[in-house]
Image (cartoon, grey):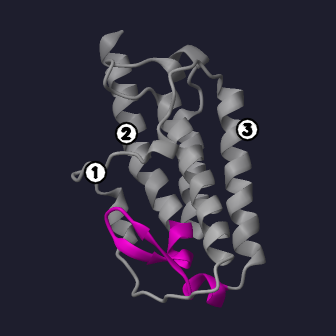
Amino acid sequence: MKVNEEARTKLLETVDGLSDEELNWKASEDEWSVRQVLEHLYLMEGGVTKTIQSQLTKEETHETAGKPIERTVDRSTKVDAPDFAKPGDSFATAAELKDKLKASHTSLQQLEDSVPTEQLKARSYPHPVFGDMSLDQWIPFVGYHELRHIEQIEEVKEAMIAAH
């Protein structure tokens, strides 16, 4: 989970110092606030963890070739969030968001620590862009996904500065 740890550290540094009001500020109705990006990230991480756990209970195995998941950070291709990872509109504090991010991160870490890599490599689950992806690639995908959204957070912060 090296990329995940690096991404999480960078993510927390990116939002450090933002007030609760700034976290919840939106540039427009059709753009996400920093809070919504953070909510999306912990929902996605939790969803990936649940998906991996679910796939591990299945007897069938299906190995698949490695995918270029590092391309996830390229924001030139827009990808709509799956329904389970779409953030809501309710106000949240930095403390609440950090607690939820820590909980989802810990769950994924515990899963990776408890399951042999061979079991993760032997099963796959489809990704909307990359197609069938081995479960062991889903874990670092979460880190690359966070790196992608750090850029989005930086854009929201720039828009906030420009608006004030």
Q: Which residue is mark 2?
A: 152
Q: Is the C terminus in the top left, top right, bottom left or bottom right quadrant?
A: top left
Q: In this rendering, would 128 be left or right of 107?
A: left
Residue 54, given in percent of the width and then of the height, sits at 64, 68
Classify mark 3: helix, strand or loop: helix
Q: Residues within 10 Å of mark 2 (few under 14, many from 20)?
A: some
Q: Is the N terminus in the top left, top right, bottom left or bottom right quadrant?
A: bottom right
Q: Please say if 78 is above or below 141.
A: above
Which residue type does callout 1 highlight? Answer: Arg
Q: Which residue is mark 3?
A: 99
- Callouts 2 and 1 close, C-beta under 8 Å: yes
Q: In this rendering, would 136 be left or right of 126?
A: right
Task: Name the residue nearer the viewer: 125 or 20.
Answer: 125
Residue 102, given in percent of the width and then of the height, sits at 71, 46
For the point 53% across and 23% down, the residue is: 23
Quadrant of residue 116 within the rendered picture: bottom right
Which residue type does callout 2 highlight? Answer: Gln
